[in-house]
């Protein structure tokens, strides 16, 4: 019999799963399944919410960036009227927009506010009517469904004015002199920023809107010393700063004007023939020529029969044998040089009686009594060096039918009843512009024979020789113009003796300038003018100076009354018109713009400019100006009646012609200067495609020298918007649709080439976005047809474009136009 195996080796007896165990297992599996389902549901909801919020963020960011792209002034603030209507968003400038994305609907709204940072750095929202601080807050609200409720996400951005300096300071005061007499018309400005400036009114009051920092205040006014303050700090409460200008004292300048004589020998007298007594008391025809030495030293002539320093040659109108060179005269020189300030006499006789005096020749003809000079013909005497390369002087005269063979400037004309100079007459050089003289040296020389010489019937002026007493060589600059460059006094004319006296010269150190024919001086010297004293000056004018002058008269255009005290400028030089409206400007040679009433120094008249060339040693006269009476007009340009719109051009039209322009400053203010008296039209200069003004224009009545105020404008965008969705059936088109608008009917979409662009055609277009929405800016107050062009697949690898349109869409602001195929 077999033995029982050990217990360890016995097979365990099989047993089943109990019901309890089954229930536990089922419960566990169910729990895991439910948990997984719940986790999946929550995860899907979270993903859905996250996607919706991401889309909301993108929509908000797109709107913020579109506003950032605008000029700061055109980011319009939400009005109080819109804020008062729940939910307090912008309904006027930025109407709410709806976007259908997937199965969700998003609504986007905007609020734009003026804000500032307080001392703690917190953002404080201001009233829409508050002054713009240069900082705006853009708040974009996006509403969308979320879990059975509506969720609103808010996104905020700050946009600052990059060019704004906050002008929250005010400088004001009264300008007067040291006797407390107000000074109208004084210009006050900030040295560090001279665009911040004001002009004192008739009461002396001025004010300047500026920022709150520390600056230097300056003031100027003709007739007063310039004013400059120490450092002045301008606070938000304003700064009262009265200015006292020190009136320049008045002095005078007088003296003598003379012309510097030529620094070479001159021919001073020609007598072609005169019948007179000669050495033996016999009467005989005598001809003679006189020279004069206006220099301070002797001048050699030469020795008989030897090479000489100077030769006297004659040319006749007939030429040939009628011409006589120095050698043909065969001069016998009794005197070999000309003393300073003395004469030298050439004659056909050794000594003779002329003009009541017996005179002796310094050089006489080798053949005494010869008749070489015809008194009935044109001729020329020239004084030349031995080599014939230089002519010291020359005089030519005409007869009644011939011109002098040669001459300086222009020949002396035939002025006798007969022909040529005539027998017994003389051609004599002047001692000054106005007269010839026997007492003064005959040395007036402008290098123009017709100006420098005169003729007489009979012998009025005696001839002189080297043995005669020296003559006074001081050529009075009679009728010369002389001025002091103080910018206040007026130019005067010298008397017949060259005397001048200038009154009402401002105290200080100035230059004196004078002009006379081809003589001038612009660097005579500087002079110090003291109060109630007259400074004396002796001024000698040089010929051939590089300087010149401009002279003229300024009058009122309507009455032609002379205008005194008008500021005249050329380059950096300034002068004032005198009581007769006359002015003169001392200038170096060159091209200039001459400005009457430069910079509107007088606010009662306009400013005129002429361009001319100033020639050396000459006065350009007759540079006259007729100024129109004018006034001023001021106002403010805003975007909503409160917020400044800087940088806008405003102009004034008179008779349809633009006369004055200005640009609004950082606070929107402008002042038009030089506006014609009468009724004018004032308007901002805008882009008609994007801006509109209310009112469009303003009529203003302008009074002379006065300011017409209150010419205010509100400038806003002239663009409205056509916006909406593009759909095929009930689904948004996300692949892009070309949306176009035109005021004319389009048979098809034209090719926009150069010919089309340069015509009068205007088409506005945009592509719809990936959410099937579009927003097309259009000029307001016009009727359009909106076209949409959609390209889709049509058959195998084929596309076709289908179009729809919506006609007679009037755009007043923002209009929804949904386009559906």
Image (tube, helix red, strand yellow):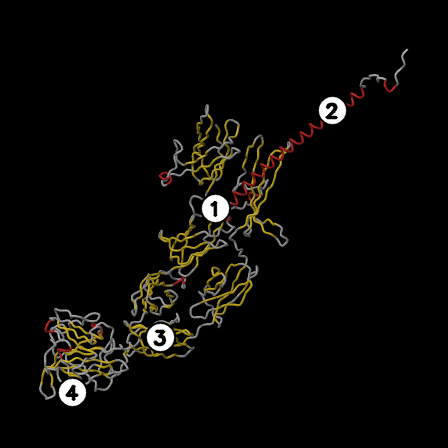
Residues at badges 1 and 2 in contact (C-beta under 8 Å)? no
Specify which label sits upstream in the sequence, 3 or 1. Answer: 3
Task: Tell me where residue 241 appears, x and y as whole percent.
Answer: 53, 65
Decide which of 810, 534 is in the foreground and name it.
534
Specify which label sits upstream in the sequence, 1 or 2. Answer: 2
Figure quadrant of residue 385: bottom left
Q: Marks 1 and 4, Cα distance to the nearest angstrom?
A: 99 Å
Mark 1 Cα-neighbour bin, 10 Å: few <14, some 14–19, many ≥20: some
Mark 4 Cα-neighbour bin, 10 Å: few <14, some 14–19, many ≥20: some
Residues at badges 1 and 4 in contact (C-beta under 8 Å)? no
Task: Tell me where residue 188 appears, x and y as whole percent.
Answer: 47, 64
Mark 1 or 2: the one toward you = 2
Task: State the residue position of label 4.
Answer: 358
Task: Tell me where residue 527 appears, x and y as whole percent.
Answer: 39, 76
136 relative position to 148: left or right: left
Q: Is residue 797 visible?
A: yes
In the image, residue 163 sits, relative to residue 526, either above or below, namely above
Figure quadrant of residue 428: bottom left
Mark 3 or 2: the one toward you = 2
- SS under mark 2: helix
Mark 3 Cα-neighbour bin, 10 Å: few <14, some 14–19, many ≥20: some
417 relative position to 631: left or right: left
Q: Quadrant of the N terminus?
A: top right
- SS under mark 4: strand
Task: State the residue position of label 1.
Answer: 716
Q: Residue furthest front?
A: 1
Specify which label sits upstream in the sequence, 3 or 2. Answer: 2
In the image, residue 807 sits, relative to residue 442, either above or below, namely above
Task: State the residue position of label 2.
Answer: 29
- SS under mark 3: loop
């Amino acid at each position: 019999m077999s033995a029982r195996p050990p217990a360890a080796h016995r097979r365990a007896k099989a047993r089943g799963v109990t019901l309890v165990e089954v229930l536990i297992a089922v419960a566990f599996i169910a729990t895991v399944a439910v948990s997984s389902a719940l986790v999946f549901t929550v995860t899907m909801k979270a993903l859905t919410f996250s996607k919706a919020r991401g889309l909301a963020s993108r929509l908000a960011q797109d709107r913020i960036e579109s506003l950032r792209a605008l000029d700061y002034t055109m980011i319009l603030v939400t009005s109080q009227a819109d804020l008062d209507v729940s939910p307090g968003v912008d309904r006027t400038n930025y109407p709410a927009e709806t976007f259908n994305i997937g199965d969700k609907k998003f609504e986007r709204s905007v609020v734009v506010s003026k804000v500032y940072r307080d001392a703690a750095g917190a953002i404080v929202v201001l009233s829409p009517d508050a002054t713009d601080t240069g900082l705006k807050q853009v708040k974009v609200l996006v509403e969308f469904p979320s879990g059975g409720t509506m969720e609103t996400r808010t996104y905020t951005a700050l946009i600052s004015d990059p060019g704004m300096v906050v002008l929250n300071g005010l400088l004001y005061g009264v300008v007067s002199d040291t006797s407390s007499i107000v000074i109208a018309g004084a210009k006050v400005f900030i040295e560090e920023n001279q665009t911040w400036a004001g002009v004192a009114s008739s009461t002396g009051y001025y004010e300047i809107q500026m920022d709150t920092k520390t600056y230097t205040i300056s003031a100027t006014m003709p007739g007063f010393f310039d004013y400059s303050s120490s450092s002045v700090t301008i606070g938000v409460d304003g700064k009262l700063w009265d200015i006292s200008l020190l009136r320049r004292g008045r002095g005078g300048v007088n003296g003598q004007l003379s012309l510097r004589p030529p620094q070479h020998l001159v021919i001073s007298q020609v007598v072609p023939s005169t019948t007179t007594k000669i050495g033996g008391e016999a009467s005989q025809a005598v001809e003679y020529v006189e020279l004069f030495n206006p220099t301070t030293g002797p001048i050699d002539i030469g020795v008989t029969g030897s090479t000489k320093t100077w030769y006297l040659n004659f040319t006749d109108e007939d030429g040939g044998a009628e011409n006589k060179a120095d050698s043909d005269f065969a001069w016998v020189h009794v005197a070999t040089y000309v003393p300073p300030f003395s004469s030298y006499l050439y004659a056909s006789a050794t000594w003779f009686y002329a003009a009541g005096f017996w005179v002796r020749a310094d050089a006489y003809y080798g053949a005494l009594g010869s008749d070489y000079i015809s008194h009935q013909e044109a001729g020329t005497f020239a004084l030349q060096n031995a080599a014939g390369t230089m002519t010291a002087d020359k005089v030519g005269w005409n007869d009644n039918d011939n011109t002098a063979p040669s001459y300086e400037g222009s020949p002396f004309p035939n002025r006798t009843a007969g022909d040529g100079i005539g027998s017994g007459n003389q051609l004599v050089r002047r001692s000054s512009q106005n007269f010839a003289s026997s007492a003064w040296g005959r040395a007036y020389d402008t290098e123009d024979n017709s100006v420098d010489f005169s003729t007489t019937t009979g012998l009025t002026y005696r001839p002189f020789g080297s043995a005669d007493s020296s003559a006074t060589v001081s050529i009075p600059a009679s009728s010369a113009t002389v001025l002091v460059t103080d910018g206040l006094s007026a130019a005067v004319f010298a008397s017949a003796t060259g005397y001048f006296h200038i009154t009402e010269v401002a105290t200080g150190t100035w230059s004196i300038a004078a002009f006379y024919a081809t003589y001038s001086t612009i660097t005579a010297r500087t002079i110090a003018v003291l109060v109630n004293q007259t400074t004396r000056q002796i001024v000698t004018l040089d010929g051939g100076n590089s300087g010149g002058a401009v002279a003229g008269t300024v009058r009122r255009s309507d009455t032609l009354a002379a205008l005194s005290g008008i500021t005249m400028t050329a380059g950096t030089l300034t002068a004032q018109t005198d009581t007769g409206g006359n002015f003169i400007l001392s200038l170096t040679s060159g091209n200039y713009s001459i400005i009457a009433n430069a910079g509107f120094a007088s606010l009662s008249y306009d400013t005129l400019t002429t361009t001319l060339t100033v020639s050396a040693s000459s006065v350009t006269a007759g540079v006259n100006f007729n100024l129109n009476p004018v006034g001023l007009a001021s106002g403010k340009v805003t975007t909503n009646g409160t917020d400044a719109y800087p940088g806008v051009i405003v102009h004034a039209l008179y008779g349809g012609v633009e006369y004055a322009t200005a640009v609004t400053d950082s606070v929107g203010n402008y002042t038009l200067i030089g506006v014609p008296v009468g009724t004018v039209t004032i308007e901002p200069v805008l882009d008609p495609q994007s801006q509109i003004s209310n009112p469009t224009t303003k009529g203003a009545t302008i009074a002379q020298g006065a300011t017409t105020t209150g010419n205010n404008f509100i400038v806003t965008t002239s663009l409205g918007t056509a916006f909406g969705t593009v759909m095929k059936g009930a689904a948004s088109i996300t692949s892009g649709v070309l949306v176009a608008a035109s005021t004319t009917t389009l048979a098809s979409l034209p090719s926009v080439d150069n010919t089309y662009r340069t015509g009068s055609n205007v088409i506005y277009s945009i592509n719809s976005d990936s959410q099937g929405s579009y927003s097309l800016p259009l000029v307001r107050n016009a009727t359009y047809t909106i076209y949409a062009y959609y390209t889709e697949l049509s058959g195998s690898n084929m596309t076709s474009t289908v179009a729809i349109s919506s006609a007679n869409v009037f755009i007043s602001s923002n209009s929804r136009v949904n386009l559906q195929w």
